[in-house]
Amino acid sequence: MFQDLRETLAAYRARDPAARSNLELLTLYPGIKAVRSHRRAHWCYTHNLKFLARWISQSCRRRTGIEIHPGAKIGRRLVIDHGMGVVIGETAEIGDDCLIYQCVTLGGTGKDVGKRHPTLGNNVMVGSGAKVLGPFTVGSNSRIASNAVVLQEIPPDSTAVGVPAKVVRIAGKKVNYASEVDQIHVTDPIAQELTALREQIEQLKKQIQDIQETKE
């Protein structure tokens, strides 16, 4: 237990330049509190103390804003940076040395039974706001961009971006369709809907004007 804690503190110190001391990490960082709480909840879960496990996890959720189901399996040296809004589902599995930012969801699609949530390999980074949904694997050393929505397996050493996410790099090299993914000039569905409404309004105005001219 103490070895795991020492490794976790070292991982935070290595990844977060704002971390100034182990005391600060232990007392003020919600990610560390959430993972330590999850270790206890997971022990209860695996020993058939399901109610107590959920009570521990929900108490931690209220204190940290991070919700980790007691059934999730988490490896060593996980860093949850900022953490608010992170949700990790019951059958999710996370390897060693992973980094997860705020508002990340490792969830299900509602269509699967049994294994419903994703598996992250070792040294995976999931950017803020990303959603990884379904019972597939994100390969080791991969990177998921902020706000990406991942719905299928990601090979190792990859970078995935977009909605739905596409792999744009593997082992540092661009894939053939990488040029199709444009994270800057993204079509805004709300803007499209407003444009369509404006066109309908203009058509109605013209019809009203034609009717008035006919009456005159």
Image: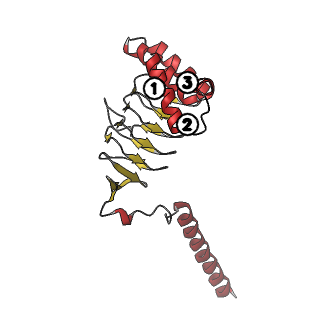
Q: CA distance from mark 2 to mark 3?
A: 14 Å
Q: Residue at x 58, y 29 (%)?
A: 30
Q: Please say if the residues under marks 3 and 1 sit with CB atoms less than 8 Å apart.
A: no
Q: CA distance from mark 1 to mark 2?
A: 24 Å
How crowded is the residue under tag 3: few (<14 C-alpha within 10 Å), some, or many (20+)? some
Residue 212 in percent (x, y) is at 67, 83
> Residue type at mark 1?
Glu
User: What element does badge 2 sit on?
Assistant: loop
Q: Residue at x 61, y 72 (%)?
A: 201
Q: How is the image coloured?
A: secondary structure
Q: Which mark is residue 7?
A: 1
How crowded is the residue under tag 2: few (<14 C-alpha within 10 Å), some, or many (20+)? some
Which comes before the other along the chain, label 2 or label 3? 3
How crowded is the residue under tag 1: few (<14 C-alpha within 10 Å), some, or many (20+)? some
In the picture of the structure, the residue carrying the numbered disc 3 is: 33
Judged by depth in the image, the label closer to the viewer, 2 or 3, is: 3
In the picture of the structure, the residue carrying the numbered disc 2 is: 85
Q: Quadrant of the C terminus?
A: bottom right
Horizontal placement of 46 versus 20: left or right?
A: left
Q: Quadrant of the N terminus?
A: top left
Q: Nearer the viewer, residue 20 or 216?
A: 20
> Residue type at mark 3?
Lys
